[in-house]
């Protein structure tokens, strides 16, 4: 066993809401970096989904610290909006990919008219 994990197991360290908030911040940073740095529409789309899921994790972690249900209800609404976004967004990306044979955002900018 890794010494740090063995020490954590023997000392009984608990994962608090702060750990989840830190994980959500890291996931949000990865998603925003993917959105800003990548030019593929599918990768950008997945980055947005990662950012939405990090917000869900934040709501649920804050909710567990407070002890109410509002965070979980908000996370449920965000998942519903994300599912609708995935449906419409992927349909648009697939339709453009069939016409253009590329998913590059730079090439899609030429479609504006």
Image (cartoon, helix red, strand yellow):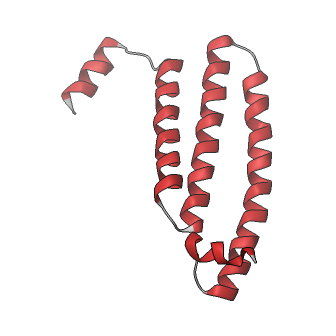
What percent of the width, then of the height, locates residue 106? 56, 72
Which residue is more in the foreground, 64 or 51? 51
Left or right of 73 in this view: 14: left
Instruction: Give the residue displayed 64% in from the left and 43% down from the top.
Output: 52
Left or right of 109 in this view: 68: right
Picture quarter containing residue 104? bottom right
Instruction: Give the residue displayed 45% in from the left and 36% down from the top.
Output: 26
What percent of the width, then of the height, locates residue 74? 77, 31
The C terminus lies in quadrant: bottom right
Left or right of 9 in this view: 81: right
Q: Exactly how many numbered labels are in the figure?
A: 0
The N terminus lies in quadrant: top left
Q: Is residue 99 above or below residue 69?
A: below
Which residue is more in the foreground, 87 or 60? 87
What percent of the width, then of the height, locates residue 58? 61, 29
Q: Is residue 17 above or below residue 78?
A: above
Instruction: Give the residue displayed 51% in from the left and 66% down from the top.
Output: 39
Instruction: Give the residue displayed 68% in from the left and 86% down from the top.
Output: 98
What percent of the width, then of the height, locates residue 86? 72, 59
Q: Is residue 39 above or below residue 85?
A: below
Q: Looking at the image, which residue sits at the far left?
A: 3
């Amino acid at each position: 066993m890794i010494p740090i994990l063995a020490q954590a197991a023997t000392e009984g360290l608990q994962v608090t809401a702060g750990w989840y908030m830190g994980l959500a911040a890291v996931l949000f940073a990865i998603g925003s970096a993917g959105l800003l740095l990548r030019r593929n529409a599918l990768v950008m789309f997945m980055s947005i989904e990662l950012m939405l899921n990090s917000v869900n994790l934040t709501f649920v972690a804050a909710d567990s610290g407070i002890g109410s249900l509002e965070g979980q209800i908000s996370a449920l609404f965000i998942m519903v909006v994300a599912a609708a976004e995935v449906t419409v967004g992927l349909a648009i990306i697939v339709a453009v990919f069939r016409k253009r044979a590329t998913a590059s955002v730079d090439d899609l900018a030429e479609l504006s008219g």
